Image (spheres, grey):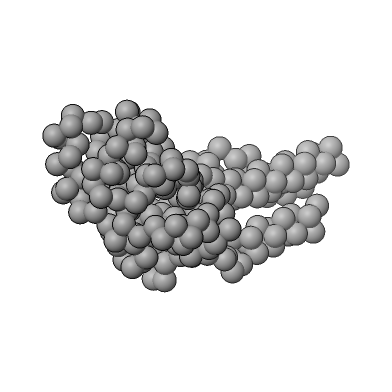
Amino acid sequence: MKSLIASVLIVAFILSCGPVKPYTVTNFFRSSKIEERGIKRIAVLPFENLSDFRGAGYIVTDEINLQLGKTGIFDLVERIKVEELFKEQDLDTLRFDPVTVAKIGKMLGAQAVILGNVTNFKPHPKTVIDTSRRYQRDREHLPPVIIIGDHDDDDDDFWKVACVVGTVATVVGGLYLLFRTKPSAEVGASMRMVDVETGEQLWQVKDVFRGNKKPVQALVKTKEDRKRLVYDVEYLTRILCQEMVGTFKYRQ
């Protein structure tokens, strides 16, 4: 029994402390027709917000504009120009059928447009769970391990079983504390690029980032930035958009 418990703890330690590879976005499609058709000037249209967080669409749209601009791959239609057109034409993100998309793109002088949905947008909860107190409460409910003096064989067997049960409960409780889902910021989005002339989809990507996931945390360098991923939903949005835009460098 002791060797089994030791093995479980060793495996848990290795899993929690071993090196972690940075997260790679794999759920995407990217057409080589972007280069073949000379797609250079693009417009990012306001994203539809499917989350419960008011304003999430604006935040993600603004960030994807910034990250696309930093790549130097495309010439972006100014954000204010897009917003002015939407006001003038009384457009909204729920009316993006193919005909409307082509019309908007041509009015903006773009060869392609970026459309998107914000699927998840969850800031870190205001109340932080006190893990140390929770662990103490868990310990208070564990079967006690009592050391006594002389006793008969039946009592001896009873206390041996009690000790085993207590040890197992301690291990299970420790593993739960180690691997349980902790509060964290979370952001998810789905994006696509559409050719204004043909209506063809040239790029699509979809993903969800949770700030406390180790592969996501491996995308940043410092301890302070890893903490920001957990507590700062806008910083997590930046990293998500940065990695999504990064898929443009892969040709398929």
Q: Nearer the viewer, residue 227 or 233?
A: 233
Q: What residue sits 57% from the left and 65% below the top? A: 20
Image location of residue 11, percent across then percent down: 70, 60
Image location of residue 187, percent across then percent down: 40, 45
Q: Nearer the viewer, residue 95 or 12?
A: 95
- Residue 37 in the image: above or below residue 176: below
Q: What residue sits 78% from the left and 55% below the top? A: 4
Q: Nearer the viewer, residue 53 or 166?
A: 53
Q: Is residue 23 left or right of residue 78?
A: right
Residue 219 seen in the current view: yes
Q: Residue reaching furthest right?
A: 153
Q: Is residue 196 left or right of residue 82?
A: right
Q: What residue sits 25% from the left and 50% below the top? A: 109
Q: What residue sits 33% from the left and 68% below the top? A: 72
Image location of residue 177, percent across then percent down: 54, 48
- Residue 159 in the image: above or below residue 18: above
Q: Is residue 170 left or right of residue 68?
A: right
Q: Is residue 54 left or right of residue 186?
A: left
Image location of residue 242, percent across then percent down: 39, 60
